[in-house]
Amino acid sequence: MSSTNTEAKNRRFVLIIVAIVVAIALVISGVLVWRSNNSKDSQHQTATVTSSATANSDKKKNAGKKPEKSPAAKASGSASSDTASRVLDKQVMDAIVDTYNSGSGSAAVSVMTSDNLKSYSSDNASYSMSAAGLYLPPWLAYYDVAGGSPSGGYQSVLSSMNNGKANELIDRDGGMDMLNSWLNAHDYDETRFGHLYGDVNASENGYDNTTSSDDAAKNVDAAHHQG
């Protein structure tokens, strides 16, 4: 009995030890699994936070930057800036022109660049007014029809306002009616010839030569392009 009891006690002791070892092993295994999972979650959260922080940082950087303009937009902006720099300040110019306006007459001023940009046009610039010394139209009409400047001393029409030569040039254009038709065809709407140069009687009888400031500026620009 004594021997049997001793063996039974020894077996129970061994089973208890085995059970403790298994329990410890399970605890250790559970801790390792938990730590492994916790490490993965931590890495995932860290990666998410890092990614989110990077995205937010990129947004802040981009928010401080202006969007890049395309080459076409840059060219357009440059052209607009160039045009604006060649346009006179209307308010300033109007103040100057208005000092010459009075009850007895009106002043008109037009400024045009060599590339047809209307740099300034006063309030009365499109109105038809009596024209004195307007020698460009017959010259421009001849040049346009003949394709070149008239020969035979007609340069004096422009250089010294020679009335005789200017009237000869109108004849070479086909007369005043032809000259007026040419003016109308080329959009000089406010320019008309009612008499020959120097014909004071016709002018006093209401047959006036008229033009506008805008038309006169267009005349000068056309003469510039003829060279």
Image (spheres, grey):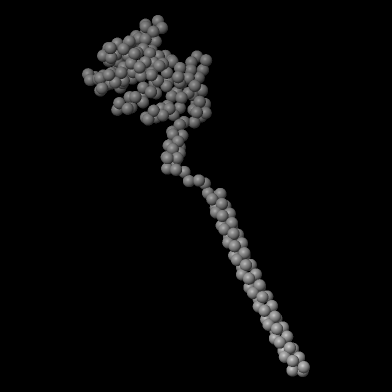
Q: Quadrant of the C terminus?
A: top left
Residue 177: in sight, yes or no? yes
Task: Name the residue: 55% across, 54% down.
Answer: 58
Outermost residue on the bottom side: it is 2
In terms of depth relative to the viewer, which is nearer, 213 or 37? 37
Q: Quadrant of the N terminus?
A: bottom right
The picture quadrant where one finds residue 32 is: bottom right
Q: Picture coordinates of residue 174 (x, y %)?
A: 28, 12
Q: In this picture, is 158 found above or below 77? A: above
Outermost residue on the left side: it is 152
Outermost residue on the front side: it is 1
Q: Picture coordinates of residue 132 (x, y %)?
A: 38, 16
Q: Is residue 154 left or right of residue 130?
A: left
Task: Name the residue: 26% across, 14% down.
Answer: 172
Q: In this picture, is 28 found above or below 110? A: below
Outermost residue on the right side: it is 1
In terms of depth relative to the viewer, which is nearer, 27 or 208? 27
Task: Name the residue: 33% across, 18% down.
Answer: 137
In terms of depth relative to the viewer, which is nearer, 147 or 185? 185
Q: In this picture, is 215 found above or below 5? A: above
Task: Name the residue: 56% across, 49% down.
Answer: 63
Q: Picture coordinates of residue 19 (x, y %)?
A: 70, 80
Q: Is residue 179 left or right of residue 88?
A: left
Number of numbered markers: 0
Q: Is residue 18 left or right of residue 90?
A: right
In terms of depth relative to the viewer, which is nearer, 131 or 54? 54
The picture quadrant where one finds residue 163 is: top left
Residue 167: in sight, yes or no? no
Q: Picture coordinates of residue 80 (x, y %)?
A: 45, 36
Q: In this picture, is 74 found above or below 120? A: below
Q: Is residue 35 left or right of residue 124?
A: right
